[in-house]
Image (cartoon, rainbow, N blue to C red):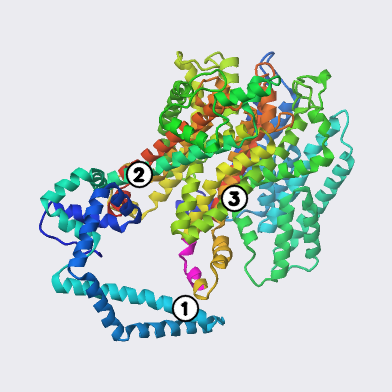
């Protein structure tokens, strides 16, 4: 190589231990791939021409991909030569920031990471909270092209701008002050404002606010809060942060859609606009009743997230308590609880859900209950195994020697220390729940057919597969994106929370 | 009765008596053995009581007890217990009434006293004339008599069968798993039936239409036994499941078990084939990914696997139909048993999730095994990389993979309903979905329960495969 004094192993170590290096290659490759996908989509096989709008987007993605790969090569060069990234290379991050205008979050998040040399959990959270608000703003702004907008549209957009400005200010302040051991006291005010902006569903802002408050109260005495540690470890994997970004983007979008989106466009039939191809006013086209597919998918996110979260939370609580009791008390309690749960475990989740819905009828509430019941045994088993493991630890014996009651030991000492695998498990299963929800809706056994839910939209669209495939493709893509995000996040959380990897 | 098997030198009866004694220690098995060999148990009991009477067991016991009491042992125990309790209460700063402390101390002392007493008694009896007055020993003594042994085999044959099963670890394990599965199946039948029973739906009204009169509905309910009390219906259903006779379906008046027997093989064949193909594809991918962690190859395949986990079956099926049936007329869009080409898309769609899950599991479990010490040893010995991976690592990495395959197979069988609907396959899944709108109780019931039974059988096979692949589990099985 250029420097003969360092060995091959050392070069490899320098490259592998550098976060920006791997993130740059990831962002470059992903935007390159997206550029290709867009290029393929812009091509019209009928007359051999290209759709201009999609083609421009494709070119923009290619441009940023090439730029990103160039930066990647520079980083590589810097690392091999001096073991650190030079300032001039970091400056290029500002150029890459422009990619946010093309909604290329892959390059944009990388650019933010590149600009700042010393990254803290607070900085990462600030970047992501700003990105989330900007993305929601951009997607909501698409409504401007519609013939009319919702009543609350102007207020909603104004609030989003305010939130974005506040979060930008917070980002700048955090970048300047958060690294200090003791932050100035007025950062508490910033934290309060950030927590206020999180009512939009932007949980990044909430986490950031909590992190700042924790840091202020800590006054530099300890090495930092647990939340910060988890965020720091999570942010090492770009895919899991992007997954979280997409989930929180959808959450924010579905909360702000109460103001910025018009429900009428999603549910009222408009026979003059049946099966329109995608255009600016209807970015994803319209369905066979002339309803805007884009609005329908946005409103569908609400249902999918709500059903997914609820049908994960209910079995998490019930299964968690049963598993904890069963694992702690053991013997007969354990035997009875686990044998009863074995019965539930023997029936496949979907089949049990079908049986329950057959008995009580198809509705959203029944769907949530049906999906919850089937998931209880898996959570109980996970919790039981964890509790059994933790119960043998010495501090539990110590607590018992001090005369704590069983209940105190179980819920105060054991459960908090065996909750991490449950969080990972639940994140990974939300994806499955989202798939089950849409599958059951597709069969006509889930959410009521008049509600715009992704499975319902797909079901209607599948009838027009031959002529208007987009009506079935787009809702499917939305489902995949959400499920993939949860899976990425779950994988990242497992790596971040698993003490085995330390 | 503690572990001092009396060896009398009779090579045939001794092991049997040893097993008998061992089984008596286990509460569930002792009950079972006493019941199955009820006539033998009765004889043994009578003989035991007679022997106790003959040798003055009661007298000796009384004597021992009095002797022990005379030494003041009991009072000593009581004082000790009281002291212990008082100190404990003082440490925790608790205030407990004297009466309660007394009671507690008494209880503790009594337990200890009984223990010592039994020990003393046993010692004395054994020292005096080498006698033991336990159930197991009495049986042993009797069984040495060939006449009794022959008689007991005749009248207590089931008991000896149980003894035979218990003496062989594998057989015992299989039998225990079978019994558990039967309980699970009973539970499933009970659960599904109860859910359908308390359903507010009214199949009669749904089938006969809105114009049906009250008499018509009553006649319908009478015909299908829906007017019977809960337990009668439950019993009929459970009996029906085990005798393969669930009666006629509400709609179409067809024999439910016959219909299920027609549809089940279709689903089972498709899922079995796709499991096989999925495993064949996923194992090499996972192992290669694990041998080159964090390489481009690894990232790409694991991303594809995650994508495979995230695609809903029905969407994937629709996209396949769109691309391979509509845009490119390569494969038929609907399934037809005569045309094997039409089975390709359903098999691929069904197998995607399993392939992804198995590949991910293979990677992580192989990675875990590769970092074990014995692999380092194998490398240090100078074995080729290939040999180390395929001979030493993969075998041990297989165990969690088998678990995942078993679990996913069950999920696939249940989730096949969606894929079957899209490709218009007349399998068990689409049968249940079609019948649930009424709801056709016997059909839904039969479909769900027979699927659960199949999954239980698969799980038993998976558990047995553990023993096959893992010597650690095999040796553990022998010990317990």
> Label 1 to label 2, Cα distance in Å?
51 Å
Tell which subunit mark 3 falls on. A
Query: Circle 3 is placed at which residue position?
Result: A316
Tell which subunit mark 1 falls on. B
* Mark whose residue sits in front, 2 or 3: 3
Q: Where the N terminus of chain B falls, by quadrant?
A: bottom left
* Mark whose residue sits in front, 3 or 1: 1
Q: Position of residue A446 (x, y in %)?
A: 65, 33
> Label 3 to label 1, Cα distance in Å?
43 Å
Query: Circle 2 is placed at which residue position?
Result: B466
Query: Is A234 drawn above or below residue B76 in the view shown?
Result: above
Q: Quadrant of residue B19?
A: bottom left
Residue A331 included in the magenta stretch of the image: no
Along the line of sight, which residue is nearer the eye, B103 or B452? B103
Q: Residues within 10 Å of mark 3 (few under 14, many from 20)?
A: many
Magenta stretch secondary structure, dominant? helix
Query: Is A79 drawn above or below residue B286 in the view shown?
Result: below
Query: Circle 1 is placed at which residue position?
Result: B103
User: Residue at position x 55%, y 38% from top?
Assistant: B194
Q: Position of residue A190 (x, y in %)?
A: 80, 60
On whether disc 2 and disc 3 are found on a single subunit, the reply is no
């Amino acid at each position: 190589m250029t420097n003969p004094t360092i060995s091959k192993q050392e070069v490899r170590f320098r490259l592998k231990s550098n976060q920006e290096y791997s993130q740059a290659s990831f962002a470059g490759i992903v935007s390159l791939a997206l550029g290709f996908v867009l290029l393929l989509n812009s091509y019209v096989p009928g007359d051999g021409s290209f759709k201009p709008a999609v083609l421009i987007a494709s070119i923009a993605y290619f441009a940023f991909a090439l730029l990103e790969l160039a930066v990647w090569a520079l980083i590589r060069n810097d690392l091999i030569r001096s073991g650190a990234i030079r300032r001039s290379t970091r400056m290029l991050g500002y150029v890459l920031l422009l990619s946010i205008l093309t909604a290329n979050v892959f390059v944009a998040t990388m650019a933010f990471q590149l600009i700042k040399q010393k990254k803290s959990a607070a900085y990462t959270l600030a970047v992501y909270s700003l990105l989330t608000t900007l993305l929601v703003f951009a997607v909501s702004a698409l409504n401007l092209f519609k013939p009319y907008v919702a009543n609350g549209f102007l207020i909603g957009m104004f609030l989003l701008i305010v939130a974005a400005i506040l979060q930008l200010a917070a980002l700048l302040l955090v970048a300047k002050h958060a690294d200090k051991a003791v932050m100035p006291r007025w950062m508490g005010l910033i934290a309060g404002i950030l927590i206020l902006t999180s009512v939009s569903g932007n949980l990044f802002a909430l986490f950031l606010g909590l992190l700042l408050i924790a840091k202020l109260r800590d006054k530099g005495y300890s090495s930092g809060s647990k939340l910060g540690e988890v965020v720091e470890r999570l942010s090492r994997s770009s895919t899991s942060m992007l997954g979280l970004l997409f989930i929180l983007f959808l959450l924010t979008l579905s909360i702000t859609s109460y103001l910025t989106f018009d429900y009428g466009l999603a549910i009222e039939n408009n026979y003059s606009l049946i099966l329109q191809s995608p255009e600016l006013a209807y970015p994803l086209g319209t369905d066979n009743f002339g309803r805007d597919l884009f609005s329908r998918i946005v409103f569908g996110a609400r249902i999918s997230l709500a059903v997914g979260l609820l049908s994960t939370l209910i079995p998490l609580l019930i299964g968690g308590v049963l598993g904890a009791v069963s694992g702690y008390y053991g013997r007969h309690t354990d035997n009875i609880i686990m044998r009863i749960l074995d019965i539930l475990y023997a029936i496949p989740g979907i089949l049990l859900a079908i049986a329950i819905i057959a008995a009580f009828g198809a509705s959203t509430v029944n769907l949530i209950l049906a999906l919850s019941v089937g998931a209880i045994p898996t959570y109980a088993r996970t919790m039981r195994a964890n509790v059994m493991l933790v119960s043998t630890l010495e501090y539990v014996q110590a607590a018992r020697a001090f005369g704590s009651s069983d209940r105190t030991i179980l819920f105060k000492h054991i459960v908090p220390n065996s909750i991490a695998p449950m969080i990972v498990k639940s994140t990974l299963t939300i994806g499955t729940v989202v798939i089950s929800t849409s599958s059951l809706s597709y069969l006509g056994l889930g959410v009521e057919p008049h509600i715009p839910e992704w499975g319902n939209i797909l079901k209607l669209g599948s009838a027009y597969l031959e002529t208007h495939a987009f009506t079935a493709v787009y809702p499917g893509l939305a489902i995949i994106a959400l499920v993939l995000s949860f899976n990425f996040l779950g994988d990242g959380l497992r790596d971040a929370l698993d003490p085995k990897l330390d | 009765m503690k572990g001092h098997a009396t060896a009398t030198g009779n090579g045939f009866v001794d092991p049997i008596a040893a097993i008998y004694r061992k089984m008596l220690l286990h509460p569930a098995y002792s009950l079972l053995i006493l019941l199955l060999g009820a006539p033998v148990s009765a004889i043994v009991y009578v003989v035991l009581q007679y022997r106790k009477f003959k040798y003055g067991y009661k007298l000796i016991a009384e004597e021992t007890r009095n002797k022990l009491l005379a030494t003041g042992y009991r009072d000593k125990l009581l004082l000790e217990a009281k002291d212990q309790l008082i100190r404990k209460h003082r440490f925790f700063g608790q205030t407990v009434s004297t009466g309660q402390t007394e009671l507690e101390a008494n209880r503790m002392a009594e337990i200890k006293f009984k223990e010592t007493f039994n020990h003393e008694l046993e010692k004395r009896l054994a020292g005096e004339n080498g006698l033991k007055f336990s159930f197991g020993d009495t049986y042993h003594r009797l069984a040495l008599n060939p006449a009794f042994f022959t008689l007991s085999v005749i009248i207590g044959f089931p008991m000896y069968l149980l003894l035979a099963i218990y003496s062989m670890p594998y057989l015992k394990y299989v039998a225990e798993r079978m019994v558990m599965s039967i309980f699970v199946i009973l539970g499933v039948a009970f659960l599904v039936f109860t859910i359908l029973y308390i359903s507010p739906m009214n199949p009669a009204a749904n089938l006969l239409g809105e114009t049906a009169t009250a008499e018509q509905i009553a006649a319908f309910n009478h015909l299908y036994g829906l007017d019977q009390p809960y337990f009668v219906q439950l019993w009929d259903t459970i009996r029906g499941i085990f005798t393969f006779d669930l009666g006629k379906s509400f709609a179409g008046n067809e024999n439910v078990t016959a219909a299920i027997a027609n549809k089940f093989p279709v689903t089972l064949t498709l899922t079995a084939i796709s499991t096989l193909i999925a495993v064949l594809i996923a194992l090499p991918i996972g192992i290669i990914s694990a041998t080159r962690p964090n390489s481009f190859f690894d990232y790409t395949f694991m991303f594809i696997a995650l994508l495979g986990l995230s695609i809903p079956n029905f969407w994937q099926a629709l996209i396949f139909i769109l691309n391979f049936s509509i845009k490119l007329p390569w494969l038929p869009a609907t399934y037809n048993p005569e045309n094997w080409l039409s089975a390709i898309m359903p098999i691929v769609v069904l197998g995607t999730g399993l392939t992804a899950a198995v590949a991910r599991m293979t990677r992580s479990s192989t990675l875990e095994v590769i970092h074990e010490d014995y692999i380092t040893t194998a490398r240090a010995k100078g074995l080729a990389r290939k040999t180390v991976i395929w001979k030493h690592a993969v075998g041990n990495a297989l165990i969690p993979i088998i678990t995942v395959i078993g679990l996913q197979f069950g999920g696939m069988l249940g989730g096949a309903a969606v894929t079957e609907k899209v490709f218009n396959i007349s399998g068990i899944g689409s049968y249940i979905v079609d019948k649930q709108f009424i709801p056709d109780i016997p059909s839904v019931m039969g479909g769900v329960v027979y699927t659960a039974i199949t999954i239980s059988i698969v799980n038993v096979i998976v558990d047995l495969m553990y023993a096959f692949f893992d010597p650690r589990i095999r040796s553990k099985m022998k010990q317990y």
